Image (cartoon, rainbow, N blue to C red):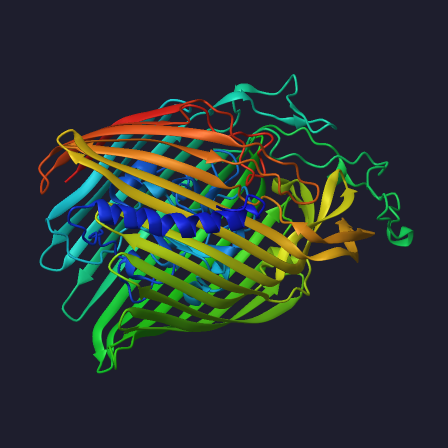
Amino acid sequence: MIDPSRPPLTRLALALAIALPLSAGAHAQSSAHPTTTTLDAVQVTAVPLGGDAEDLAHPIEVLHGEALDDRKSGSLGETVASLPGVQNGSFGAGVGRPIIRGQEGPRVQVLAGGIGSMDASTVSADHAVGIEPFLADQIEVLKGPANLLYGSGAIGGAVNVVDGRIARDLPDQPLSGRAELRAASGNDERTGMFRLDGVSGDNLVLHVDGVIRNSGDIDIPGHAQRLHDHDGHDHHGDEAAYGTLPNSAIRTRAGAVGATWLGERGHLGVAVSTYRTNYGLPEGAHVHGDDAHGHDDHGHGDHGHDDHDHDHGGHDHDGGHAHDHGPVRIDLAQNRLDLKGGIYDPLPFLSALNLRAARSDYEHVELEDGLAATRFVNRGTEARLEAVQNVFDGWHGAFGLQLGHVNFEAQGAEAFVPPSVSDTIGLFVVQEKEFGPVKLEFGGRHERVEIDSATGVSRRFDASSLSGAAIWHLSEVFDLRVGADGSERAPTNEELFASGAHIATNSMEIGDPDLDTERGQRLELGLHAHTGRVEMKAAVYQTKFDRYTYLAETGVVDGGLPVRLWTQGDTTFRGAEAEAKLHLLESDAGDFDLRVFGDIVRAKLDGSGTRHVHFDVPHGDHNHHYHADIALGGNLPRIAPSRLGADLNWAVGGWRAHAGAVRYMKQDRVATGEDPSPGYTLVNAGIAWRVGEPDGTQWELFLDGRNLTDREARPHTSLLRDIAPLPGRSIAGGIRMFF
């Protein structure tokens, strides 16, 4: 028996350790002819050496094929949120960024074809990712530190979207592609997409794709706004929107053209793409501070302030007035140029020399009453040169160089981060070798990051990472997986130099230009099992951070906004995740498969007590000076709740269907000043019918339902949980064509 007094994480780990071998062994014994399952060979492109997802020691999840079709949504975060250990960091209907094992923002790198997205989604929670999921061929999620390959911004993981705009291989047909038309209730969505790949001559592949998506305000179950009284009970304001979330409509346009030459000795490809979206921020998500000249709400309390630095001197603090703004919409445009090339067998000891590079021009404009209020501009260039070595004495590996240059600028009333220029140079090496039943993977990286701020302050950081992982094939059924790494992350521009009102977070953010590199040490233990009827995988992990960078509550209110400081403290993340796919039945009535999964993560500051700090809040030509005590212990904010989910899948002939539910548990392990979030269950189902020749044109009719019980869901990971619940019941239907 498992002791119920143990902590939840411990109980889950023990349950997994017991259930996994018993379940796999039972299925293996019940089969008349037990055999090792032949898994789909899902090739991973996000690692230099490639290979199947199941053969890599680093934890990687891949969405592709029908599974990707069934889960595609308007945002990248929502698309991958059903994977174990991955949730969505939403900011209304228009924004969704992946959260991996509790890590988000500048710790999760979003990639397009192995190169950074180079948008501004890490700067603020209301900034969307500049990638269209409907155009993806597959999506690869690297869980745990991926900075060995992609720099310090991937210390929590990476999500790589493979779009095929630059071809890797010659298509089997002279002309191939796919198209989709869909419509949905709940937000009156209308989406159309297409993709065409054509072969010209013997070695030239041409590509074109595009998507148009329009949706209106989303339907919600009940009121948009949830209020908390002093007794901790929830209620709604009389004037809160009901049944519909105002200003949540979205208009998206995206497309690309590409050309790739594939020769015997190498390849070269180029693609030009654009992504444009206009989305609204729900009412209450963009509220300016309220400071009525009397400055009575600085919230000194026990925190106090230094009077000699707090002399208002009759200054007119216009930024502190309450402003009556109309609906705020975001107009985002990103244009991008991608280049990929490679030479085969360039030197006797190299099998390939590959180059990836991209140039991005990103602009994000916040429109208030139809007028541009704040503009964010991000112009970036990134390049990766990878040399893949020939196998020598059983060792297979690669080494390379990564360069990055980003010019960031914010202009307008809410430009809380100063302009900056960031340059990155990194060197990395990865190696692998098999020793009988054991496969070893290890590597290292060193990078230098330089940030030159318009404030006149420049910082230089050196970040090093080492990683090791192993797969031990215990038998034809079981694989034991072990991983350990030490990684470092350089602070970002906003963590160092933020100084002003950040309306998206409803706070005054104050950076610290003296921040040091963040350092993490991860240990992970995993177990995979594959039989004729069962595919199972589970993992437990711990990551301890030295100098973890986070926003600390000060208890001070200035200009109607709470003041939060970017600071550092030791932190520990612990978690577990598991997934099992059970092939229940194969019969004339169809094949029945059951997928079950669960995940849990905990994150706490390791310190205790408080630390006394002094800080300045800018007000035009002068500062307000405060001092406060910030907590050194407790839970981190907005940590994803635990989940349990199950999906039943059926397929026969050209038909397939699925039905499932995910239970999001109550999150009551909250940070200082943070309210708990109630649990909820989301029920989804879908059915599809495909006709046509396997090697020819195929047509598919589909019908998908999400949140079928119309449950009110407020994700703990969202800054807008109290004013913008997830969409209510929605039914989407349409037609897909493959040729």
Q: Is residue 70 visible?
A: yes
Q: Position of residue 579 (x, y in %)?
A: 37, 46
Viewer-side residue, 723 vs 621? 723
Determine whether, in the image, residue 497 is placed left or right of residue 343.
right
Q: Quadrant of residue 457?
A: bottom right
Viewer-side residue, 175 vs 592? 592
Determine whether, in the image, residue 205 is placed left or right of residue 418.
left
Determine whether, in the image, residue 336 is placed left or right of residue 451.
left
* Residue 579 position (above or below residue 632): above
Residue pictured at 58% horizontal, 70% vertical: 461
Q: Position of residue 170 (x, y in %)?
A: 15, 56
Q: Position of residue 548 (x, y in %)?
A: 61, 59
Q: In the current view of this chain or complex, which residue is farthest to the top?
A: 238
Residue pictured at 39% horizontal, 52% vertical: 538
* Residue 605 position (above or below residue 148): above
- Quadrant in the picture for the C terminus: top left
Q: In the current view of this chain or complex, which residue is farthest to the right?
A: 308
* Residue 518 position (above or below residue 616): below
Q: In the current view of this chain or complex, which residue is farthest to the front?
A: 1
Q: So how many labels did they put on this image? A: 0
Q: Is residue 74 visible?
A: no
Residue pictured at 43% horizontal, 67% vertical: 148
Q: Position of residue 448 (x, y in %)?
A: 52, 72
